[in-house]
Amino acid sequence: MEYASLINNINSFVEESPLNRVETLGIDKIFNQPLVGVAAAEDSLFKQFKDPSVIGEDHLSPTEWLPGAKSVLTYFLPFSEEIRHANRKPGLPAQEWLYGRVEGQQFIEALNGKIMDRIKTDSTGQAVAPATDPRFEWSEDLSSNWSERHVAYTAGLGTFSLSRSLITAEGCAGRYGSVITTLEFAPTKRSYTGPFEYCNFCGECADRCPARAIKAVEGEKKAGMDRSICKNYLDTKIRPRFKPRYGCGKCQTAVQCEQEIPGKA
């Protein structure tokens, strides 16, 4: 299977699928066109992710998810201007963002299914999407056994921010998906050398966080999000009020890295 053909298939699905809109709110587009990257299944970073100081030993490598895996196809779907604009106001999350978060995830699952079907139908390859696999699970410390952001980092899509978001060429406001396959595609080159290279640690995400879950440590460049505080805010303030939808995203909107790499406009 040609990589370019698969990318065209992904782009067409994003552009044409009715799942990428919310008619009840008049939202014509949840996501803009994606950034797509490829990580080699044997990239040494996957071994590093098993270190407790990064993610933990429960984080499965591509070959643990799929024996014989050669490549991991990963993508970032930037939220549309309509969704981002609505969530720039302070306070509670915008209804548009909540739909983008939940209905958007349904779209991602459908896109993953489309990619896997294409791989299995048009080639002898096999594929699995960890996020929808029965083996996918969350740990007590709120880490999972497959991190979409870390996979995207491995594939050269971006680097981390103070808020643990990933800053890409299209910013940090969006969602991620990935598919592991036995097909071999050329890995995307990483244009950075460190995990926080794109973040200028301006602290705007910390100021925007309604739960005060983000804190910068002076003199240190590392993620400052306390995931337990963030989760408690979502569970006690957001889920009960907006059920069945949830989300926040204030740290990803009205910040320098919302739609670009700071300083690289």
Image (cartoon, helix red, strand yellow):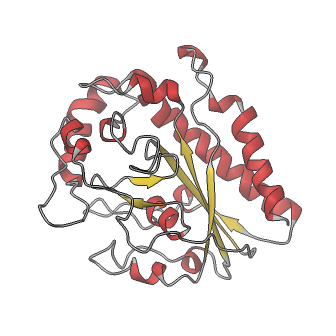
Residue 180 coordinates in the image, percent (x, y): 63, 68
Image side of residue 117 versus residue 211, left or right: right
Image side of residue 150 versus residue 21, left or right: left
| The N terminus lies in quadrant | bottom right
User: Which residue is nearer to you in this view: 96 or 167?
Assistant: 167
Residue 237 coordinates in the image, percent (x, y): 21, 31
The extreme right residue here reads 122
Seen at 30% across and 23% down, the residue is: 89
Seen at 40% across and 29% down, the residue is: 244
Image side of residue 2 versus residue 94, left or right: right
Relative to 183, say whether 116 is above or below. Answer: above
Relative to 167, say whether 56 is above or below. Answer: below
Seen at 19% across and 54% down, the residue is: 226
Give residue 40's quadrant in the image: bottom right
Residue 97 coordinates in the image, percent (x, y): 43, 29
Seen at 53% across and 33% down, the residue is: 103
